[in-house]
Amino acid sequence: MLSFRMELPCLCLLLLSCLQSLSANHDFYTSIGQMTDLLYTEKDLVTSLKDYIRAEENKLERVKRWADKLDLLSAVAIQDPEGYLGHPVNAFKLMKRLNTEWGELESLVLSDTTEGFISNLTIQRQHFPTDEDQTGAAKALLRLQDTYKLDANTISTGDLPGVKHKIQMTVEDCYELGKIAYSDVDYYHTELWMAQALKQLDRGEESTIDKVTLLDYLSYSIYQQGEIERALDYTKQLLALDPEHQRAKGNLKYFEFQLEKLKKAEEDPTQKEKERGKRETTEKKEKKEKPKKKFLPPQVPERKKYEMLCRGEGIRMTPRRQSRLFCRYFDNNHNPMYVLAPVKQQDEWDRPYIVRFLDIISDQEMERVKQLAKPRLRRATISNPITGVLETAPYRISKRRATVHDSLTGKLTTSQYRVSKSAWLTGYEDPMIDTINQRIEDLTGLEMDTAEELQVANYGVGGQYEPHFDFGRKDEPDAFKELGTGNRIATWLFYMSDVAAGGATVFPDVGAAVYPQKGSAVFWYNLFPSGEGDYSTRHAACPVLVGNKWVSNKWIHERGQEWRRPCALNETE
């Protein structure tokens, strides 16, 4: 027993040293790359737990069963950490386990007044994911559900395209998602996930969550969506199980009263006549006030176009336009570096002109870039122009230092629609970065001295980047003033991983969708040769449904390109 107690502090120190890189940054859910460390941490925790069990086995049979379950789960996950966490349900369950369930285990072990394992776990929990991580992972699942039109059962059973590690959600998992939606006043998703939890209970799944709790949430969320009759039906089901449920008894009377009121209003001929009169008066007024307009086809909202493109729907290029897209061996006007070994280039889109370079970055280079970037990944913040307070952006889920230029101040800030982490890499840190920068210069013919540093991003659970421009618009006269290198003339984007499902780069205004292909890079001009912005380059990164998305990009600026890309006479040329 004495030797066991001596080993525990050593194990604790080892685990703490592994966690030091994690302690500075939480928001684990925003990067699959950083979340892989948590799998190793959890594996070490299971090992520590099993050591404790061997010492106290006769007292802690319940704890042993817990450890065996997690041991099996960790063993599978460690074989392919990134692939395992590429499944969003696995990522959510990891957040949930480390943030919630390990805390429950701590309480169980504390009741036995033991030391060693408890002190070990308590210290490590300081570096675990937070409530924000668990909530963020849950909201990412809801966003994936909406963007890719997935039903709750598909996600719960793990039947997602391209998955390697299929896993099912429990009643507790579904209930947790519903609760998070409920706390966000999102009654639509509350209904979906409480109904899914109820369905799984009805199939005979064992759970600590009872039907009464689920029916309580269901009836209220349905009522909040205006469906009083259905809400009443669920309330009656609840009272059949628990006749003394005080809230349900009150809701029953209220719902019945509201339904009766609606029926009376429908049956009252006087009320009907009044409503008809109001409608006719309104219609006459509108006819008089509104001049006749030519019929215009309804405009599809950008958000809808974006989601349709993410699902592979939407605009299709005509065969005539497709016939003008080619692939070729490219040496950029006989650049000495590529005369004997030209690179493979293919056209992705014609307007705006987007090209892809194939096999343009090696596996060794990609791994080195990831290795350099991973410890530097930081969560994005934005400076509120009114308060000056740094805030995290609520929409985009990817670990990228989401820097943009504030249109009011011209200073480098981070975007309001990016929740992200990123790292900036320079040639001073590794000669390989200089090599990559030189390659971009040789293939684009553009000056790299005035370009921004290479930016590396790893997307998290449901990681996305909503529609945006890379260049500064006319209403942002001070954009990039801080850099002193002019506007962003072009964008170069490396794809450093394949993505099993989702994660495309889409251009909603024109209908282009470019899919990640490991080792390739895409390039487009943000500005016309005249210096005017090309608004068709507005683009977005679709949520990653399954997989792990790594990208790096280079934003190239105007200064230094005067002779490399001369100005045209026409502002749109």
Image (cartoon, helix red, strand yellow):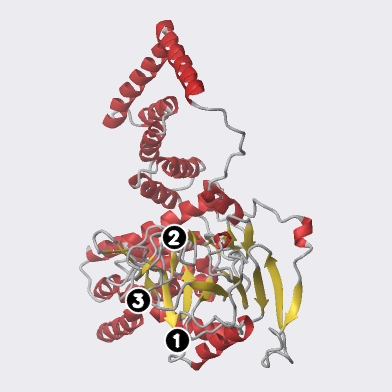
Residue matched to label 2: 92
Q: Which of marks 1 and 3 is nearer the N terminus?
A: 3
Q: Which residue is drawn at 62% across and 58% down?
A: 161
Would residue 254 be seen by someone viewing this image from the given angle?
Answer: yes
Provide residue 218's location: percent of width, then percent of height: 40, 37
Residue 55 in which image quadrant: bottom left
Where is the C terminus found, in terms of image quarters?
bottom right
Q: Earlier in the sequence, mark 2 or mark 1?
A: 2
Disc marking residue 22: 3
Amino acid type of disc 2?
Phe
- Mark 2 vs mark 1, foreground winner is 1
Element at label 2 = helix
Amino acid type of disc 3?
Leu
Amino acid type of disc 1?
Thr
Q: Is residue 321 depicted above or below 411 in this figure?
A: above
Q: Is 566 situated left or right of 480 in this image?
A: right
Q: Distance between the residues labelled 2 and 3?
A: 18 Å
